[in-house]
Image (cartoon, rainbow, N blue to C red):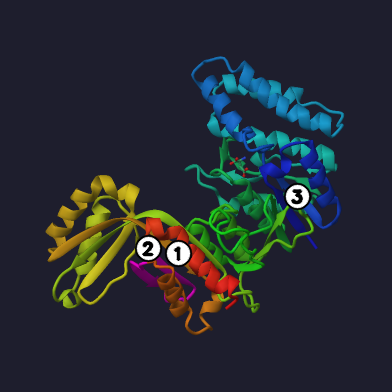
Amino acid sequence: MKKVVKFGGSSLANAEQFEKVGNIVWADESRRYVVPSAPGKRHSKDTKVTDMLYECYALAEVGDSFVEEFAAIRARYQEIIEGLHLEFSLEKEFEEIEKNFKAGAGRDYAASRGEYLNGIIMAQYLNFEFIDASEVIRFDENEEFDAETTNKILSKRLQKTEYAVIPGFYGAKKDGTVKTFSRGGSDVTGSIVARAVQADVYENWTDVSGFLVADPRIIYKPEPIEMITYRELRELSYMGASVLHEDAIFPVRKEGIPINIRNTNKPEDEGTWIVGSTCQKSKYTITGIAGKKGFCSVMLDKDMMNSEVGFGRKVLQAFEDNHISFEHMPSGIDTMTILVHQDDFVHKEQSVVSAIHRLANPDHIEIEADLALIAVVGRSMKSSRGTAGRIFSALAHANVNVKMIDQGSSELNIIIGVKNEDFEVAIKAIYDIFVLARI
Ligand code: ASP
């Protein structure tokens, strides 16, 4: 049995958190490959080391003094080393980093040092081998992650290594230039390592006990999700649910490796399992609800639209020419609605409208702003009758006017458009009918 375990920034924010991590790793000898983030916030007003590094490097880049900022970063690591009673120092590493900052080593290099240094401490603490991610995670000439080359290098390297720490978030090009993934990218590293060693499980340890059925800022103590498929997760994360970096799914999905989201502060909780497919029904008809505010709808009508070949293409052309991607496109017999992000659309609306008139010549165009989209996601919806009916009667009872409905052909997801101001009420109504009423 082989497990890859990734720990997020809040799990490694100070010595006390490191101790919890040590206990988790030592409790199970199959936890063989550890991927740490940089130290995160110790309390809500604290700053993550990654952000401190970005700020510090911004000063170095323009030739300003960064002495104080650098000392503050050093202090964060020193606090951890001393708190763990480790007998070693990062003096040499800091000297080298300072030199490289002055020489303009780049923003990515700067940010990556957060994970690099934390990885060294973690390896010392656990007594595991340290493997620098620059040597095993490869980016190509265009600065894109090179999945196949990485997999070759990393699997070969780890074949010889029984227990190792591989820092998250970064890798390097062939010439050694350090590159990072986007923010939160240690999740991606964990997934890449899991693929390379063909792990049985990729455990992703964070500060919540997995995914929740709905956003806790809207629902008081929402139920946790025990098991979710990759596809359900993709739908929910796209619509705003965030615990795991979106790109972290791809490397393990290919190999059918499950991801288990766990809580470092409550290791006894089972967390959420993210799997390829499952015969286990979700506890409720729905798996989760997520949503976002800030959409606009552009509604067109034209008599006999349904028989006009190429009408839809011409309309979409108007959006494409203005570099606007659309979210949804429900249509009726002589009507068609395009939903777009309000922020992208607002400056270009007149140019889009005139392009639609020119290209597609509709009878009428109507724009409505301040809409929210809510995704109700669940693999069990396919096999249960009346799900949509229940959603809409719950919304009607809550006095929410439904502006748009879109159900994908997979029956995995029903998207509902409501006014921004109805967003929270709508989510509560849907949560209540499926979770509290347990249907
Ligand atoms: N430390 C990086 C960040 O704050 C990467 C990570 O934590 O996953 O985004």
User: Which quadrant is the C terminus positioned in?
Assistant: bottom right
Q: Nearer the viewer, residue 426 or 369?
A: 426
Q: Residue at x 37, y 70 (%)?
A: 405
Q: Residues within 10 Å of mark 3 (few under 14, many from 20)?
A: some
Q: Give the residue type at disc 2.
A: Val
Q: Give the residue type at disc 1.
A: Ala
Q: For the residue labelled by badge 1, is the local secondary structure a helix, a strand or a loop?
A: helix
Distance between the alpha carbons at the discs numbered 2 and 1: 8 Å
- Mark nearer the viewer, 2 or 3: 2
What is the x, y in percent for residue 373?
41, 61
Distance between the alpha carbons at the discs numbered 3 and 1: 32 Å
In reply to whether residue 194 is colored magenta, the answer given is no
Q: Nearer the viewer, residue 268 or 79?
A: 268
Q: On residue 265, which mark appears?
A: 3
323 on left or right of 86: left
Which mark is first along the chain, 1 or 3?
3
Toward which corner of the image does residue 325 lie, by quadrant?
A: bottom left
Residue 36 higher or lower than 204, as above or below: above
Please name the residue that numbered disc 2 is placed on.
418
Q: Residue at x 83, y 29 (%)?
A: 82
Q: Residues within 10 Å of mark 1 (few under 14, many from 20)?
A: many
15 on left or right of 43: right
Q: For the residue labelled by badge 2, is the local secondary structure a helix, a strand or a loop?
A: strand
Determine whether the beta carbon of the residue marked 3 sits less than 8 angstroms from the nearest atom of ligand 1: no
Q: For the residue labelled by badge 3, is the local secondary structure a helix, a strand or a loop?
A: loop
Please name the residue that numbered disc 1 is placed on.
426
